[in-house]
Amino acid sequence: MNKLEEEYEEIHPKIYAFFYSKTGNRMTAEDLCHDTFYESCKNIVSYNGHSTLSTWVFSIAINLLKKYYRKNKYQQSLMQKLATLPETEVHSLEELAEINEDTKILLHHISKLDDASREIILLRIYGELSFAEIGVLVGKSENYTRVTFHRLKLKIQKLMEVTL
């Protein structure tokens, strides 16, 4: 349990950022974060050590997110909402304080990716997981996730250069 407590301090911001990027709602992200660590504590005896503890916790987080989508018949994720926003939309001062323009544009370009690619990008950027850990979560090899991330990063960088 001590290891989980130590891991909590390190991984909590990453789990929160992952949920926030997926839902676009702070309260929902906090609730899902809480549920993730509750389930982790409750089921720590089932952790078998085949992956890192953070990978195991992220797998719980991903499963809870899927459950949340099913339970609430979630219609649009943050990514889908951003994909429909025009890139030159004018924002209120409050919105500008919450999200800077570069981040919005980045998320807009990420939202245009297919689900598998978007998952790899979000787990790497917001989850700060290693390529091996991401590979375990998406069911692909470490090399596949590394190469895919690199290609996606280059693609997004080119799009960002054109947009900015």
Image (cartoon, rainbow, N blue to C red):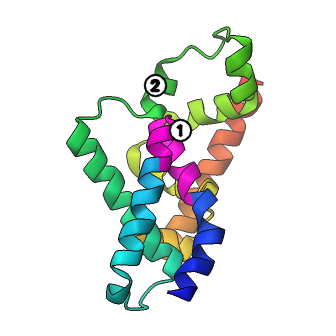
Determine whether, in the image, residue 46 is placed left or right of residue 141: left
In front of the other: 142 or 129: 129
In front of the other: 40 or 76: 40
Q: Position of residue 4 (x, y in %)?
A: 53, 80
Give yes or no for residue 20 being in the magenta stretch. Answer: yes
Q: Position of residue 48 (x, y in %)?
A: 37, 91
Determine whether, in the image, residue 68 is placed left or right of residue 158: left
Mark 1, residues whose alpha carbon is within 10 Å: few (<14), some, or many (≥20)?
some
Q: Is residue 149 above or below residue 152?
A: below
Q: Secondary structure at mark 2?
A: helix
Q: Which image quarter: residue 35?
A: bottom left
Task: Identify the residue under disc 2.
Answer: 81
Give yes or no for residue 28 being in the magenta stretch. Answer: yes
Marks 2/1: CA distance?
A: 16 Å
Q: Residue at position x 47%, y 19% from top?
A: 84
Q: Residue at position x 41%, y 52% from top?
A: 116
Looking at the rendered image, the disc whose residue lies closer to the viewer, 2 or 1, is 1
Q: Position of residue 54 (x, y in %)?
A: 52, 74
* Residue type, mark 2 in image: Lys
Please report the bounds of the magenta region as a residue range. 15-30
Task: Identify the residue under disc 1.
Answer: 26
